[in-house]
Image (tube, rainbow, N blue to C red):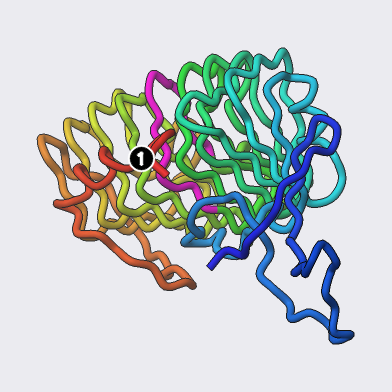
Amino acid sequence: MRRTSARFKLGSAVAVVTAAATIGGVTAWNGAAAEPEAAETLAVGTPEGYGQNTTGGAGGEVVQVSDAGAFAEAAESDGPLQIEVSGTISLSDMTDVTSDKTIIGVGSDAEITGSGLNVSEADNVIIQNLTFSNSNDDGINVQYSTNVWIDHCDFTGASDGSLDIKRASDDITVSWNHVYDSDKNMLLGHDDDNSGEDVGNLKVSYHHNWFDATNQRNPRVRFGNPVHVYNNYYNDIGSYGVASTMDAGVLVEGNYFENVDDPYHLGEGDSGPGDLVARDNELVNSSEGETGGSVSNPSYSYDLDPAADVKSIVTGGAGVGQI
């Protein structure tokens, strides 16, 4: 249960503080230390999968932003912070996000447009309930970062990747997002020559995402092993769904593929094959994918929805405004 809190204005920010008991306007103390309480958090729900330990800016001050300058100042600040985004924020360049941040859109019309977010050398970041549109680069780029949860966002129209994860990043969950009108979608591991950084890292869970007429990289994986792709809905995919390359190990489980000629395969372009295990997927007007090798089971517990139910579950719950 979330504790009772009081809000007060602090400059342009809104801070959250625990209300002390008062009697007749005088704070009542009994000399004993207060019992520890769970940190106040704006994030809705909790992450499942490899990013399960992510808490973002929980316990930090809450700030409300509605323009690019205030947003960048908050996202790049030191220490834990919870950032509420209202309306449309237009960025001209990729904006850095530092450790211990929660960034959450207010309502169903909070949007980052023009450019995207760069989660670099950061730990413990939550990004939730935001639309990322028409970036001049990536929608979100994650590199050298750990414990990241990206949840209930929309991605469309990025000039590069919608959501790329690379350079030794690890322990990440990508859940309940809706991606559409995208070519290069979700890249995991950026280069065939980066094994020195990436082997042993790039463990990512992709679940309950809606890949809606995206073209490729849903995801394309290098080196990450195991990577868990489960309970996602794929419809009308242009080139291919999931690719396992460069000694990656990808478990494709309980997904619903509809009108997908190439749901999953080994190798891609000049990248050699990885391992891919597919089980319990629903294939509707879709080809059989290519599998090979073995992949370890995930190291966490999870609830797997029946693949036949995934289309209705995901289309009814993925994306902005569904939390």
State the extent of the magenta-drawn residues as a range.
173-187
Corner quadrant of residue 26: bottom right
Q: Pinpoint residue 294: horizontal percent, then vertical percent.
A: 38, 65
Where is the C terminus found, in terms of image quarters? top left
Determine the residue positioned at 84% across, 38% down: 10
Q: Pinpoint residue 215: horizontal percent, then vertical percent.
A: 36, 24
Type of the residue with mark 1: Ala
Could you classify mark 1 by the number of other residues whose Cα lies within 10 Å: few (under 14), some (14-19), or many (20 or more)?
many
Which residue position is annotated with label 1? 318
> Helix, strand, or loop for circle 1?
loop
Residue farthest toward the front in the current orientation of the protein: 24
Determine the residue positioned at 48% across, 56% down: 45
Q: Nearer the viewer, residue 107 or 100?
A: 107
Q: Pinpoint residue 307: horizontal percent, then vertical percent.
A: 19, 54
Residue 192 on the magenta segment: no
Residue 120 appears in the picture as rendered: no
Residue 183 on the magenta segment: yes
Is 150 situated above or below 170?
above
Q: Nearer the viewer, residue 309 or 138?
A: 309
Determine the residue positioned at 83% across, 74% down: 28
Corner quadrant of residue 267: top left
Determine the residue positioned at 15% across, 37% down: 286
